[in-house]
Amino acid sequence: MAVKLFVGGLSFSTSNERLREVFAATGQVESAAVVTDRDTGRSRGFGFVEMATPEDAEQAISKLNGTSVDGRTIQVERAKSPGAGGGERRGGGGGGGGRGRW
């Protein structure tokens, strides 16, 4: 069963192919993707790599976390499942204060 890893701290010049190449040195890579900004197409500085087995994933974490790739120190950890992240994002603001707009 494939294990998804989060990779943070990527250089903006790191490509999907380069990310795959780096992780392939530690085990079998199922997929590798650098996350890009939807409007500009520019890297957002993080990505995801799917390793073929839990053993490959652990090997990648232990060998690559804290190492330098393309001049930047990367962080490698198991990706959190959707919905398990940092709380809900809700629109906020507005209201209160007693001062009207007009």
Image (cartoon, grey):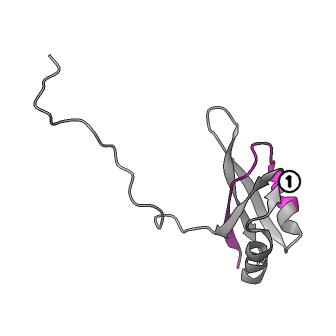
Instruction: Determine if the magenta segment contains residue 2.
Output: yes
The residue under label 1 is which amino acid type?
Arg
Residue placed most toward the observer, 3 or 73: 73
Where 68 sits versus 60, above or below? above
- Residue drawn where x is 67% and y is 53% of the image: 46
User: Image check: 23 left or right of 61?
Assistant: right
| Residue sticking out furthest to the bottom | 55
Residue 16: horizontal and vertical position, in percent? 80, 51
The C terminus sits in image quarter = top left
- Which residues lie in the magenta part? 1-21
Residue 35: horizontal and vertical position, in percent? 67, 49
Residue 58: horizontal and vertical position, in percent? 73, 79
What SS does tag 1 mark? helix
| Residue sticking out furthest to the top | 102
- Residue drawn where x is 82% and y is 50% of the image: 71
CA neighbours of label 1 inside 10 A, class few (<14), some (14 to 19), many (20+): some
Q: Which residue is mark 1?
A: 18
Instruction: Determine if the magenta segment contains residue 3.
Output: yes
- Residue drawn where x is 66% and y is 32% of the image: 40
Where 92 sits versus 102, above or below? below
Residue placed most toward the observer, 69 or 28: 69
User: Image check: 41 left or right of 89?
Assistant: right
The N terminus sits in image quarter = bottom right
